[in-house]
Image (cartoon, helix red, strand yellow):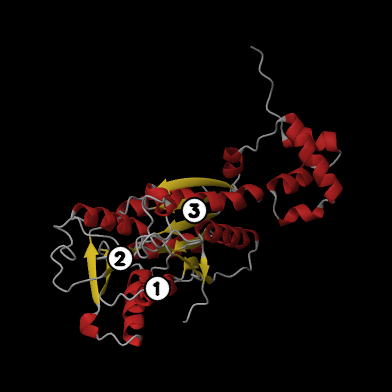
């Protein structure tokens, strides 16, 4: 079989009647493309498509250039959360002609360090980190000093000069608690997942603080404000979480820090033949797709995850393409409460819009 040589920028430049530099400006998609007229840009892109031109990222890296790539470092890919984040980010990165490299650290600080080094060695322009470990902050600062843009998504583990896009989970907790109070629940327990030592996610404590704040404002004394933890990655079985099966305090509602914990609680309550919500109401936070299944009906607060991801991707592109761009913390409000049968019998209601009382 006779193989045709790969088309090069020189071929496109010759057919378009422009310089190789002009072709590079247009196909790289950066601000330098403005040096070429819109009509000529369209012609260059058409010629590139017709020729089947594919940029040689390896050659570009060997020339010491960053390769218009962004690294996405997730803890894991479970539970559909990461999938929705990637969908939102890809909406932007594809439009802006950036590629992505996905890495996983599996909630392990040492592996996260290794993955960060690996991503930087591939000359990515930037790295978006989910669940950054405290002990890896010096490495992140070092990478940033070398020109790699760093951004956090979902939580800012500490006060560092990095971009961060997060959801206002404290606001979400307030909405959820007020809903439970509005339906007459007074003995509410917040169920969170235990954190591995050293992870230090700030929002973990923000949730707890918001929970106690709302109950205090509602006149519930401190000794009647209950919290409990289950193991990260574990199941909410009786051995891990005694209430409400032993139920010494007579809880009438469980507020899970996320929907996955809420789904585990629903399962365990059903196994114990506790009526939901007549005896114990259950509510989650984040609105996982399965929560809306009529057979499950978990009340929750909607997290606009794909929207958040698009904002994070746009911020990363801006940081990469504009040398003067500064990092910022962007907090997305929690405004949508979804009421379902786990808190109101027979309910499967559309979005209820709230003006948060915060």
Q: Depth check: 170 or 27 in front?
A: 170
Against 199, residue 175 (above or below) is below
Residue to which mark 2 is pinned: 281
- In the drawing, what numbered circle is on residue 100? none
- In the drawing, what numbered circle is on residue 179? 1
Dot placed on the residue nearer the N-terminal end, 3 or 1: 3
Secondary-structure class at tag 3: helix
Residue 103: x and y in percent read: 42, 47
CB of mark 2 within 8 Å of CB of mark 3?
no
Q: Depth check: 352 or 192 in front?
A: 352
Secondary-structure class at tag 1: helix
Q: Is residue 216 among the parts visible in the rendering?
A: yes
Please rate how many residues cluster around mark 3, counting C-alpha atoms within 10 Å: few if below 14, some from 14 to 19, many from 20: many
Residue 104: x and y in percent read: 39, 48
Secondary-structure class at tag 2: strand
Where is residue 327, by image quadrant?
bottom right
Please rate how many residues cluster around mark 2, counting C-alpha atoms within 10 Å: few if below 14, some from 14 to 19, many from 20: many
Q: CA distance from mark 2 to mark 3?
A: 29 Å
Q: Depth check: 331 or 335 in front?
A: 335
Against 20, residue 220 (above or below) is below
Residue to which mark 3 is pinned: 85
- Write the residue at 43% across / 54% down: 292
């Amino acid at each position: 079989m006779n193989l045709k040589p790969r088309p090069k920028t020189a071929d496109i430049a010759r057919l378009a009647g422009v310089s190789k530099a002009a072709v590079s400006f247009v196909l790289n998609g950066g601000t330098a493309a403005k040096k070429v007229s819109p009509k000529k840009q369209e012609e260059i892109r058409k010629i590139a498509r017709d020729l089947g031109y594919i940029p040689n990222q390896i050659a570009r890296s060997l020339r010491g250039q960053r390769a218009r790539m962004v690294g996405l470092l997730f803890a894991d890919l479970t539970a559909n959360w990461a999938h929705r984040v990637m969908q939102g980010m890809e909406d932007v990165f594809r439009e802006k002609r950036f590629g992505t490299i996905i890495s996983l650290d599996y909630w392990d600080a040492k592996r996260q360090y290794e993955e960060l080094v690996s991503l930087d060695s591939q000359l990515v322009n930037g790295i978006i980190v989910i669940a950054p470990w405290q002990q890896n902050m010096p490495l992140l600062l070092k990478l940033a000093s070398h020109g790699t843009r760093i951004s956090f998504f979902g939580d800012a583990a500490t006060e560092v000069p990095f971009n961060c896009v997060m959801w206002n989970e404290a606001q979400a907790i307030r909405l959820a608690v007020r809903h439970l109070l509005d339906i007459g629940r007074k003995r509410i327990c917040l169920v969170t997942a235990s954190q591995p030592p050293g992870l230090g996610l700030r929002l973990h404590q923000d949730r707890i603080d918001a929970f106690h704040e709302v109950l205090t404002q509602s006149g519930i004394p401190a000794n009647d404000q209950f919290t409990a933890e289950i193991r990260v990655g574990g199941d909410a079985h009786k051995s891990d979480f005694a209430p409400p099966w032993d139920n010494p305090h007579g809880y009438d509602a469980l507020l899970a820090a996320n929907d996955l914990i809420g789904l585990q609680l629903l399962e365990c309550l059903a196994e114990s033949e506790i009526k939901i919500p007549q005896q114990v109401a259950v509510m989650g936070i984040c609105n996982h797709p399965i929560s809306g299944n009529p057979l499950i009906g978990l009340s929750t607060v909607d997290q606009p995850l794909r929207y958040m991801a698009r904002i994070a991707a746009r911020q990363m592109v801006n940081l990469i393409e504009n040398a003067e761009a500064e990092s910022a913390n962007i907090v997305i409000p929690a405004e949508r409460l979804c009421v379902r049968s786990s808190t109101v019998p027979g309910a499967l209601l559309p979005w209820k819009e709230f003006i948060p009382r915060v």
